[in-house]
Each structure stands twice: as structure tokens, then as C-alpha cells.
Amino acid sequence: MPSAFCNEVSLDTKINSDLGIIGMLSTFLRASAIGVALTYGISASAQSGNDQLDSIVAVVNEEVVLSSELADELRSVRDQLRQSNTRLPSDAVLAKQVLERVVMMRLQTQTAKRNGIRVDDRQLNAALEDIASQNKMNLRQFRDAVEADGYDFPGFRERIRSEIIINRARQRLVTNRITVPEREITRYLANKSATSRQDDQVNVAQILFEVSDGASADEIARAKARGEEVLAKLSAGESFGGLAVAYSDGQNALDGGSLGWRKTSELPLVFSDAIAGLGAGESSGVVRTSSGFHIVRLVERKTDQRHLVQQTRARHILLRPGELANEKEVIARLRNLRERIANGEDFGALARAHSDDRGSALREGDLGWVNPGDTVPAFERQMDILDEGDVSEEFRSQFGWHIVQVIERRSHDSTDVVRRTAAREAIMGRKRDEELQNWLRQLRDEAYVEIRLQQ
């Protein structure tokens, strides 16, 4: 794809990925706005208000966590766990888990702030509009639906902002520092045992019993004993998700330990080995990694051998609202350009003269051959519904308003590209998971955290 549009796409995709919201919309498209909110633990506040003086349940460096914040998070997590039919642990255990999640979020937002990572209202509003659009609402309807379910929309907004900030911090301070040299990919592909099932997709979950760096032999033994105890409960028929909520030290404990769908090759080797002989719904024994001890569950497995991809060659015209033209004027201009194209004017000439994507404008709007997933969801959805030669209606992405024309489509054999891409993603995934856990552990170890939660 041409580099100029890649820059726009990569920034747009980065926002989606950072959010953990837009790029994963399929995981939380529910019948109501409350379902969306709960999926991301958006805290609710009672409409009647609370006049009681908040107590402090934790101190995180220079900030405090109030009992009202913890109560709101607990309510959201309880509702989420009930929706997923996960057995709730005791109130004390759940409060401890939820408070630890709040503490880790605070540490990450504090780190982001120190590194100058911000999310302005324009970016936040664009993210919220995408969430509303995916739920087939405009922003006003979505806000009304959230509030009708008893949730505070300003609080919703700020939690989404925090999620974006946290994931941008992870991207900048962890992921962007990871490199995958080409020679490492070549060496990986040469190792047939490592790549023989690289196309397998697995949905996995874990229960982690963390062991800190420099732990004593007694601490290691206690962590392993906890793992064996939980494994016995699992063998006795207790729910994996419920045990993860109650016992796991992992960041995904409140999600029932879910790690989601991964390529087998993206998992740590210890994990892929642990699930190699498992059927769907089965769990491993207690396995050891540098992070501690784990019980790994194979939720589901599927094999994807597709190497033919449907590519689309498209061109577009992008107009951005700004000081010289507001949103309504931009839409009107695009409609006028589309009418001129319908009346026989050349799309390429109009793109060259009017498009704000100057990189593609120099090529008459041509984006080259585009693979599925190369463009942001809003753009790809419009391309996919067009026949060759058709021009879309005007539509919005985070970066402005577009019209797009599909020039042609083809099936492309991307076997070699797919293999190297899969290898790169596998190596990157392993490094990212390890580095992220190390980073989070370092944040926790170096922070001043005082827990004042009364059991």
C-alpha cells in the first residue's frame, strides 16, 4: 500500500489497537449499551448520588483510590461475571482482585502522564462515535442508552480515555522497543518443529501464580503448592473461570483468565507445549515460566490454512474538517464531487485536485492493492460492499470524510508473505507478552502502594 495512506491507516489502527475497544468491537457488540460498558469494566454511579464521605482504600504513589471508586468497579465486575455465568468468589477475594486492577491502571496512567502521553477530546469523541456506530446508534442515542441503564456517561468517557492512554503507554514504552530482525524470522522458519502448526488458532486461558524476581525457595514452593491446590479444585469439577477470578495473579484474572485467540506460534513455548495434546475444554498441569506457575486451558482450537487473499485496488478522496470548512461543508463538498464523478468527470483528477491525503492524491487517489485488515474498519466496510467501478457514499473515519472507488479485485497467493508475517507476529507476540509482564511487574515493584482495604 502507498506509504502516505499507510501513515494514516497505521495511526488510525493504532488508536483502535490502543483502545482495546474499537479494534475489538466484535467482542462486545451486545444488545444494549450497558453490555458494552460492562465488557470494559466501565464504572457506574448511582443516579441518586452518595453523600457519604469516601474512605481511602489504597494509596498509589501520589494518588488515592476511594472506596466509592472501588465499589463502582466491584459492581461492574460482578455484573460482567454474572453475564458470563462465572461463579463469584467471596467478597473479600473479589475486592482484592479488583483493587489490584485499579492500582495497576493507576500506575500505568501515571507512567503515561510522565511520558507526555495524552488523548485529546477530538480523538476521544472519534472513538466514542465508532463505538456508537458499531452499536447502530449515533452518539446521542448511545449516550441516552448508557444513561438509561443507570450509568454515568462522563465517567464512561473518562474510562475510555484511560484505556486509550494505557494502551498507548504500552505501545510506546514496551511494544515499540521490541525488534524482530529478518535473520530471526528466517531462523524461526527454518525450525520446522516450531512452525509446523503455526497456522493453528487457539483460544486459551490461564491461572497464574506469580513468583517475583529474586523469590526465595520457600516463596517458590508456596506458589507451586497454590497451583497444585487449584489444580485439584479444577479436577474436582470447579469452574476454570471462577478459579481464575479467585486465585489468579494475572492481569486477565477478572476475565476468567482469558488470553483470547492467539496463533499457537505466538504463545510462549511452555504454553504451546502444555496444550499440544489437549482437547477443547481441557487444562494442563502446573507449568513453570519466568513469571511463576501456570495452569493453561485450551478453550478451542481451529486450523487456518488459507494463503489466498482477496485484494482490492481502490482510490479515495479524503476531506478533513478544520478552520476553513466545518463538517457540514466537508460533507457537501464530497457530495458535489461524487455527483461530478457520476456525471463523467475523472475520479483521479478530482482526487489530485481536492484530496487532503496528499500522498495518495499525487497518485490520483490510488491506494494500490489493499489486503483485508490493511485499512481501518470504517474504510474496509465501505470498500467491501462496493462492486468494481462503484463509488461509495460519503463516510467518516477518525481522520475525516471519504469517498472511495473500487477499481478492481483479485485473489493473490500470499503464501510466502503470510509465512513470514506469521513468523514475525509469533516472535513479536512472545517478546511482547514477556516484556509487558516484566514492565508491569517493574511498575508495581518500584511504586509506593499502600493498601488500606479492610477485610
Image (spheres, helix red, strand yellow):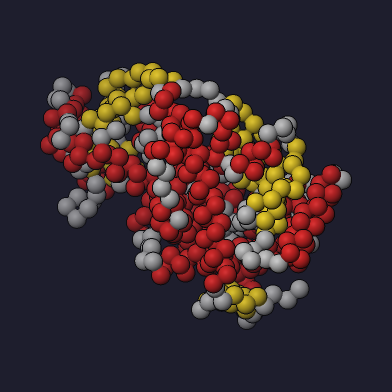
Quarter of the image that includes the C terminus: bottom right
At a point 75% along the width and 37% down the height, the residue shown is 282
- Left or right for 389, reference 225: left
384 and 104: which is toward the camera = 104
Residue 129 seen from this side:
no
Q: Is residue 381 above or below residue 126?
A: above
413 and 340: which is toward the camera = 413
At a point 65% along the width and 75% down the height, the residue shown is 451
- Residue 254 at x, y percent in the picture: 66, 55
368 and 262: which is toward the camera = 262
Q: Is residue 452 above or below residue 173?
A: below
- Residue 226 at x, y percent in the picture: 78, 58
| Rendering quarter of residue 450 | bottom right
39 and 194: which is toward the camera = 194
- Residue 21 at x, y percent in the picture: 49, 48
At a point 77% along the width and 60% down the height, the residue shown is 221
Residue 346 seen from this side:
yes
At a point 59% along the width and 75% down the height, the residue shown is 449
From this viewpoint, which residue is outermost toward the bottom? 53
